[in-house]
């Protein structure tokens, strides 16, 4: 019994669905042959043979492989009526690579294999065309020499250029048969000089060397780099197949041609054959740019019958594969051949358009239309991106904190950004070491934000994402000097006023302006996302803090607000001084006075959010961050106080000088100048400013915490300063009552952050119930609202059953929960050791980008199960930035959550990802 592994499959026999074994190209050649398309005869050597060859220390082909190849070559001889190595009627073949995943241009191909001095004469006699024969031979020598023997292209190009110059030929087609014969002779010498051996003449030896060369190309730098760049894992594609195909020639004369085509336009998605061709040329001429190809529209003029056949081929390919195809064809003396096909690579605009149009044409279902588009790819349609046609070198790499790209002049403080951006209408990029809440006005005026410190949940990152502005954070290669208004990057630098470009999608920073491509939210995208909503179980809400954020989120399709951060509302330049007064207040009465001034402002904030988002729910998180974050930095205050004290001393000195002018017999004009100077600075005002700054500095020092993110924040603030939470709750309920009174449907939800014990939640619930009773009495009816908790502390997950007794909903804050679970500070981890952990495989993903299903996910699942065991109708969602990540959304679907909430611009991505999660988890019919 023959137990030899089958490595080689004829096109008539190979399984066209088994791309892992036969590669995408080989599988498609088998499938095209079997559905009756005119494919040149051939066979496929499997990826299994490639892997065995690469694993063999001496790089020997697997046992039995060459015998199977010889058997298939004999079959090809019978199918074509030609002989491999026959000098009278030679069979020539191409040897092409092909992995399970398309990797255009990354591996190697050899054409016209089987030529030598004897078979060349057979080709010339058979075609009666010496020029064609020598042209085919010189192409084979160069390709085989480069791919199989490692001879650099430059050695061949130098000789070829010399021959063209001597013949006064501008293009290859201008060379005569004599010129090309000389080319072949020179090329053969190039190979012998480079390798020390004559060019191989035995066709079977050529074939074996070529097979090994194609196998080796899987481990070549181009292919390895491509797989890394596009995250192609061994599970997706492992090894390359080798396709041995009978040669057909597009360079047999003016009735021959070669070309590449897409069944639809890959840039726009237009339902029209798109591509290029060359008359009297071989395939590499089209892709190499040696000659300028013609658009396929011209084929209707030059070869109308062939153009009609190409249209028929297009229809057959799309009807069979039900996908846009990228295919290669050759016309040999009026005969059309299809050489290969694969799913076409398109930009997202084209993918979306073709999905919708192909569904309407009945080629695919809505489910297939949704699943053929990667959710993350929608970023191309939602954010400006750098023009892919522009090549530029970045000068620094930071964290991609908020997607999109922008150019503008660098400015180094928020006031300056506002002055230049808002006041003068200039495009500015705010550059800071790190941003603080008081910089918010600079954010509004800037095109983008760049910081040298911080991570993806830093103030800059979170605020920029909410605004839909590009942001690069933690670019530690940049040293920002705010005082000198410049930033140093290695050996170069940029100053205020210099133009820079940042790419928040990749985290790269560039000097100078780089053109961007504007996003395009097309009607087809609206249609596609409508289908997504029909399929999804998860609702998609947005993290939005302002009415503008809420309007943007609604345009993106959000059906509510899952997180409104009240601290962001405090950052407004007009109310920040009141917030500071509230913080530095030494008595409850003084604090309450400041809070009374904030109450109407907060009430209006909430009223506006409810109105914009009506009738959808709005979930408002009570104050979360440590209150010292609203105060200036201690070192800044110390420097300002030093300058104010110096100013006070100068002011007192000028006052003394003014009093002494009578003793100096000074002129009247000098007296007036001194008197004017005395009135320029009022010592009383300076002393008052000093007192304010001293009070702030005292409070900053009193509030200092070694680890503020684990300190006095969230519900702990509500326990120690209950008046703050009381003010916020009153503002929420009064705003809801006012809206209801005006006929605006509202669904407010009050969310308590950083809860770790049910006693904290009960205490806040007491505030809420007490204030609700007062508001209900005042407005004559109760307010409909829900009360719930953030789950972002590990203990909260463990005590979810008791929390569910008080909470009507859970909202997972996965940013903080991830930090707590890993004991990682995100800003430090991402800028220090996390990249090493990812590169070395200690962690598969950055857990702040991709939800850690094995750890954080288990905590979430426990909390969901235990919470719903107590309260079956418990509403559960997620509001961390993981809420906009497709793989994390898939977990949320599996865990039984009701919604995800993410920054507004990521809502479309989340909507499509939610549909993917539902479709991929649905049971297969008849399974």
Image: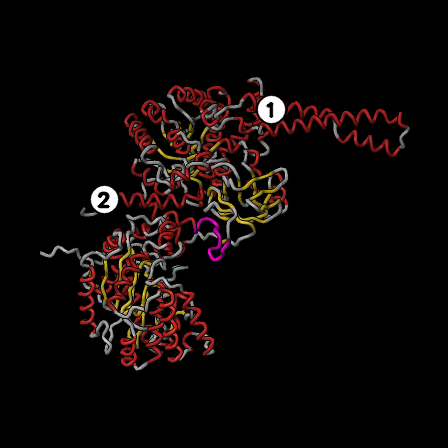
Residue at numbered disc 2: 923
**Front-most of residues 224 and 781:** 224
On the image, the x and y values in percent for residue 550 come to: 47, 40
Kindly state the secondary structure of the residue where label 1 is placed. Answer: helix
What secondary structure characterizes most of the magenta part? loop
Label 2 CA crowd tier, 10 Å (few <14, some 14–19, many 20+): few
Where 642 falls versus 83 (above or below)? above
The mark found on residue 697 in the picture is: 1
The mark found on residue 131 in the picture is: none
Along the horizontal axis of the image, is 534 left or right of 717? Answer: left
Question: Magenta span has 439?
Answer: no
Label 1 CA crowd tier, 10 Å (few <14, some 14–19, many 20+): many
Along the horizontal axis of the image, is 426 left or right of 233? Answer: right
Task: Kindly check if marks 2 and 1 are in contact, taking CB atoms under 8 A apart as contact.
Answer: no
Residue furthest toward the left? 1
Where 238 falls versus 700 (above or below)? below
The answer to whether residue 19 shows anywhere in this view is no
On the image, the x and y values in percent for residue 678 come to: 79, 29
Residue 119 position by quadrant:
bottom left
Which residue lies at the image location 35% right of the left edge and 64% below the top edge? 195
Q: Which residues are magenta?
A: 380-392
Residue furthest toward the right? 665
**Front-most of residues 727 and 244:** 244
Q: Determine the CA span between mark 2 and mark 1.
A: 62 Å
Picture quarter with the N terminus: bottom left
**Front-most of residues 740 and 463:** 463
On the image, the x and y values in percent for residue 131 come to: 35, 79
Closer to viewer: mark 2 or mark 1: 1
Question: Magenta span has 390?
Answer: yes
Which residue lies at the image location 54% right of the left edge and 36% below the top edge? 435
Residue 184 position by quadrant:
bottom left
Where 176 falls versus 738 (above or below)? below
């Amino acid at each position: 019994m023959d137990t030899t592994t089958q490595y080689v499959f004829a096109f008539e026999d190979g399984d066209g669905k088994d791309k892992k074994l036969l590669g995408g190209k080989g599988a498609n050649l088998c499938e095209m042959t079997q559905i009756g398309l005119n494919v040149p005869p051939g066979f496929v050597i499997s990826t299994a043979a490639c892997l065995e060859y690469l694993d063999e220390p001496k790089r020997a082909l697997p046992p039995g492989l060459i015998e199977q190849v010889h058997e298939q070559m004999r079959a090809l001889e019978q199918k074509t009526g030609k002989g491999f190595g026959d000098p009278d009627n030679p069979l020539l073949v191409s040897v092409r690579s092909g992995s399970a995943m398309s990797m255009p241009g990354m591996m190697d191909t050899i054409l016209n294999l089987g030529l030598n001095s004897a078979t060349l004469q057979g080709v010339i006699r058979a075609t009666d065309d010496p020029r064609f024969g020598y042209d085919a031979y010189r192409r084979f020598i160069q390709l085989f020499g480069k791919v199989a023997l490692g001879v650099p292209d430059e050695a061949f190009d130098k000789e070829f250029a010399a021959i063209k110059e001597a013949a006064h030929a501008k293009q290859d087609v201008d060379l005569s048969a004599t010129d090309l014969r000389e080319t072949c002779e020179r090329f053969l010498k190039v190979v012998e000089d480079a390798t020390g051996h004559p060019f191989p003449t035995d066709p079977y030896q050529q074939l074996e060397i070529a097979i090994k060369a194609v196998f080796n190309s899987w481990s070549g730098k181009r292919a390895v780099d491509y797989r890394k760049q596009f995250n192609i894992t061994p599970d997706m594609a492992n090894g390359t197949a080798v396709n041995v195909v009978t040669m057909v020639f597009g360079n047999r004369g003016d009735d021959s041609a070669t070309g590449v085509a897409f069944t639809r336009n890959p840039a726009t998605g237009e339902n029209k054959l798109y591509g290029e061709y060359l008359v009297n040329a071989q395939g590499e001429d089209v892709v190499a740019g040696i000659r300028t190809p013609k658009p396929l529209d011209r084929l209707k003029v030059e070869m109308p019958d062939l153009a009609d056949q190409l249209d028929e081929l297009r229809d057959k390919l799309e009807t069979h594969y039900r996908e846009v195809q990228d295919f290669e064809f050759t016309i040999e003396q009026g005969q059309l051949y299809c050489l290969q096909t694969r799913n076409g690579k398109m930009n997202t605009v084209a993918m979306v358009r073709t999905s919708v149009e192909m569904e309407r044409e009945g080629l695919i279902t809505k489910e297939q239309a949704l699943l053929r588009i990667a959710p993350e790819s929608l970023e191309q349609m939602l954010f400006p991106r750098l023009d892919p046609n522009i090549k530029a070198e970045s000068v620094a790499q930071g964290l991609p904190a908020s997607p999109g790209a922008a150019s503008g002049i660098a400015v180094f403080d928020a006031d300056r950004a506002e002055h230049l951006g808002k006041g003068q209408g200039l495009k500015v990029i705010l550059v800071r070491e790190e941003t603080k809440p008081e910089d918010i006005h600079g954010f509004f005026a800037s095109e983008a934000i760049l910081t040298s410190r911080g991570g993806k949940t830093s103030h800059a990152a979170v605020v920029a994402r909410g605004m839909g502005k590009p942001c690069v954070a933690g670019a530690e290669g940049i040293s920002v000097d705010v005082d000198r208004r410049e930033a140093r990057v290695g050996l170069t630098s940029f100053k205020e006023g210099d133009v820079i470009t940042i790419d928040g999608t990749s985290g790269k920073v560039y000097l100078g302006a780089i053109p961007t491509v504007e996003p395009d939210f097309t009607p087809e995208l609206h249609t596609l996302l409508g289908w997504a909503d029909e399929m999804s179980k998860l609702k998609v809400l947005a993290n939005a803090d302002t009415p503008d954020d809420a309007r943007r989120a609604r345009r993106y399709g959000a059906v509510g607000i899952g997180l409104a951060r009240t601290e962001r509302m405090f950052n407004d330049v007009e109310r920040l001084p009141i917030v500071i007064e509230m913080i530095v207040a030494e008595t409850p009465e003084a604090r309450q006075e400041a809070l009374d001034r904030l109450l109407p402002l907060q009430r209006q904030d909430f009223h506006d959010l409810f109105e914009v988002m009506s009738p959808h729910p709005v979930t408002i998180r009570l104050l979360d961050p440590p209150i010292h974050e609203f105060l200036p930095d201690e070192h800044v205050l110390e420097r300002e106080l030093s300058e104010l004290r110096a100013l006070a001393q100068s002011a007192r000195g000028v006052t003394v000088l003014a009093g002494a002018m009578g003793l100096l017999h000074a002129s009247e004009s000098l007296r007036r100048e001194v008197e004017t100077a005395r009135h320029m600075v009022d010592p009383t005002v300076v002393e008052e400013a000093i007192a304010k700054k001293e009070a702030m500095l005292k409070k900053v020092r009193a509030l200092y915490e070694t680890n503020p993110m684990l300190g006095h924040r969230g519900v702990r603030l509500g326990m120690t300063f209950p008046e703050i939470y009381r003010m916020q709750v009153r503002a929420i309920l009064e705003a809801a009552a006012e809206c209801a009174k005006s006929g605006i449907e509202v669904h407010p939800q009050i969310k308590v952050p950083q809860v770790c014990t049910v006693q904290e939640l009960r205490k806040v619930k007491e505030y809420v119930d007490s204030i609700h009773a007062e508001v209900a009495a005042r407005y004559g009816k109760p307010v409909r609202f829900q009360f719930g908790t953030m789950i972002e502390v590990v203990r909260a997950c463990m005590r979810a059953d008791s929390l569910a007794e008080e909470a009507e909903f859970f909202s997972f804050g996965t940013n903080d929960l991830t930090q707590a679970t890993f004991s990682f500070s995100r800003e430090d981890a991402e800028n220090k050791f996390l990249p090493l952990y990812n590169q070395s495989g200690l962690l598969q993903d950055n857990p702040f980008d991709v939800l850690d299903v094995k750890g954080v996910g288990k905590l979430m699942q426990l909390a969901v199960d235990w919470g719903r065991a107590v309260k079956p109708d418990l509403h559960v969602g997620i509001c961390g930035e993981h809420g906009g990540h497709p793989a994390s959304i898939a977990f949320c679907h599996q865990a039984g959550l009701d919604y995800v909430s993410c920054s507004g611009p990521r809502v479309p991505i989340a909507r499509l990802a939610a549909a993917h999660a539902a479709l991929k988890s649905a049971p297969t019919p008849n399974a």
